[in-house]
Structures are given as structure tokens and as C-alpha cells.
Image (cartoon, helix red, strand yellow):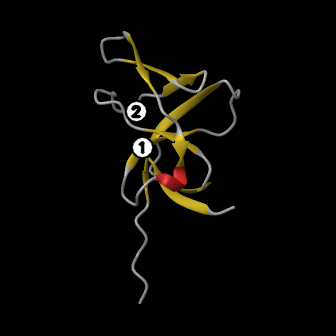
Amino acid sequence: MTGISIVESWTGNLTVRAADTLTIDVPVNLPKGADVDVSDGFRGSYLSTAGNRVHFEARPRPLSWRSPGEACLVARWGGVRQSRRFRLCSIVVSAPSA
């Protein structure tokens, strides 16, 4: 299994995650630092800055499908299979080899 480096937006830490780690696209109005919950694999929700729950269609896909430099929501460690929590991350751009 191949690892892919990401930068976690909530900590700034560089982490290596499995290529098959689930990701989803970032919703347009997602507040900074918000967690996204995805239940049943396709129904996402988060709290808006006004405190309202916002629902959207989530389409999970593997981290290996993302491009270097792309921002996306990455599934956190653990969690129940039917319900997962995602957080904003960026895919690390690899330095060109000499």
C-alpha cells in the first residue's frame, strides 16, 4: 500500500496516509476549521458560522485520485464505517527529482 503525504490544516502537521484513505471535495461555504460528518457514505453535513447544520451530497473517493497541491477533506483515523468525520487537508507537492 502506497503512502501519500498531506498537510493537516488544523495542525499544520505533515502526515502520510494510505492511498485508499477516503476523501471528499470541499463544500463551497465550509467554515475554516469545521469538521464534516458523512453518514451512509454519501450524506455530508457541517455547522455553518451561523450555527445551522448544512447538508450536502458527498462523493467519497480515494486519496490516490487527488492531485498534488489539491485541498480536500480527508477521513480521520478510526470511526464507525457508516459514519466518518473528515477534515481539511492539502496534498503535498513533491519536490522535483534532480
Location of the C terminus (image quadrant): bottom left
Residue drawn at x 40%, y 32% is: 33
Q: Is residue 45 left or right of residue 1?
A: left
Percent across and percent down for residue 25 are 41, 38
Q: Residue furthest bottom?
A: 98
Could you tell me residue 15's position as x and y percent? 56, 56
Is residue 48 or residue 62 the one in the foreground? Answer: 62
The residue under the point 40% across, 65% down is 93
Does the rendering let one see residue 98?
Answer: yes
**Residue at x 54%, y 25% (from the top left corner):** 38
Element type at mark 1: strand
Q: Position of residue 41 (x, y in %)?
A: 58, 27
Label 1 amino acid?
Cys
Q: Type of residue at label 2?
A: Gly
Q: Nearer the viewer, residue 34 or 37?
A: 37
The residue that disc 2 covers is: 33
Quadrant in which the N terminus appears: bottom right
Q: Position of residue 89 (x, y in %)?
A: 44, 46
Q: Is residue 83 left or right of residue 37?
A: right
How far apart marks 2 and 1 lie (CA) works out to 13 Å
Could you tell me if the residues under marks 2 and 1 are in contact, i.e. CB atoms within 8 Å? no
Residue 54 versus residue 16 in the image, above or below: above
Sequence-wise, the earlier of marks 2 and 1 is 2
- Residue under numbered circle 1: 72
| Front residue of 9 and 43 | 43
Examine the image and state in which quarter residue 10 appears: top left
